[in-house]
Image (cartoon, rainbow, N blue to C red):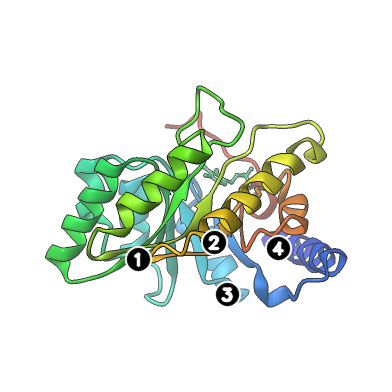
Amino acid sequence: MLKENLEEVEEKIAKACERAGRAREEVTLIAVSKTKPVEMLQEIYDEGIRDFGENKVQELTEKYEVMPKDMKWHMIGHLQRNKVKYIVDKVTLIHSVDSLRLAETISREAEKKGVTVPILIEVNIAGEETKFGLSSKEEVISLSEQIAALPNLSVKGLMTVAPPAKDPEENRPFFREIRQLSVDITNKNIDNVSMEILSMGMTNDYTVAIEEGATMVRVGTGIFGARDYSKK
Ligand SMILES: *Cc1c(COP(=O)(O)O)cnc(C)c1O
């Protein structure tokens, strides 16, 4: 069943790339496996997927221990500073950096472990109060400049979680805005800041996000099915 889900997602990604005149290789599919058992992750791994997204530190480290070592782990959820030390040397990318204090902690812990951690700056483009992330362009630009000065960390782009929408078309303007913001930041030529990654689009709206320039899409439900939180 998961294999069929994945095939469907892959097909939609391919078609969206085609519509946008983009190469399929420009888009990385991240399988968002939060709340799902490792057996299900293994099934998707066996289909060739290597990028997995988790939003909780403990769940990520537990799965990290038992899954194959060539898996790439993406931290996509809100990250508490006191937990940074558990993941800095395990993750491929931290998508959810929304403050200088968090970036400073990542920098310090990465230095202790002798690694350099790629990060994305989380942008709350719709300005929703319930969400994390920076909500003004000026804030994003100034945070990028401040973070750029920190050692053992490099800014690779932007991430956003668009609002839930009945029609994914509603989120197109947000994705477009993020892409434009990444162009604006690129044009500032800040040392140690690149905008090569745009992490945007989830099950509901990833095809629209790809059309608007996403280089990473985070798909959970579309691959693993609905999540059940009742048992926790
Ligand atoms: C859960 C989650 C996803 C995946 O959501 P789906 O709608 O299940 O695809 C993507 N990004 C973030 C940040 C998430 O927390």
Amino acid at circle 3: Asp
Earlier-in-chain disc, 3 versus 4: 4
- Badge 4: residue crowd in 10 Å (few <14, some 14–19, many ≥20): some
Asked if labels 3 and 1 touch by Cβ distance under 8 angstroms, the answer is no
Asked if labels 4 and 1 touch by Cβ distance under 8 angstroms, the answer is no
- Quadrant of res 212: bottom right
Q: Ligand 1: which quarter?
A: top right
Asked if labels 4 and 2 touch by Cβ distance under 8 angstroms, the answer is no
Question: Could you tell me which residue is drawn at 76 percent across and 66 percent down?
Answer: 7
Residue farthest toward the right in the current orientation of the protein: 19
Secondary structure under the numbered disc 1 in the rendered image: helix
Q: Is mark 1 within 8 Å of ligand 1?
A: no
Earlier-in-chain disc, 1 versus 3: 3
Pointer 4 residue: 6
Q: Is mark 2 within 8 Å of ligand 1?
A: no
Pointer 1 residue: 66
Pointer 3 residue: 46
Residue farthest toward the front in the current orientation of the protein: 188
Pointer 2 residue: 187
Q: Nearer the viewer, mark 3 or mark 4?
A: 4
Q: Residue 20: where, in percent of width, then height?
A: 82, 64
- Badge 1: residue crowd in 10 Å (few <14, some 14–19, many ≥20): few
Amino acid at circle 1: Val
Amino acid at circle 2: Asn
Q: Alpha carbon of mark 2 to alpha carbon of mark 4: how far?
A: 37 Å
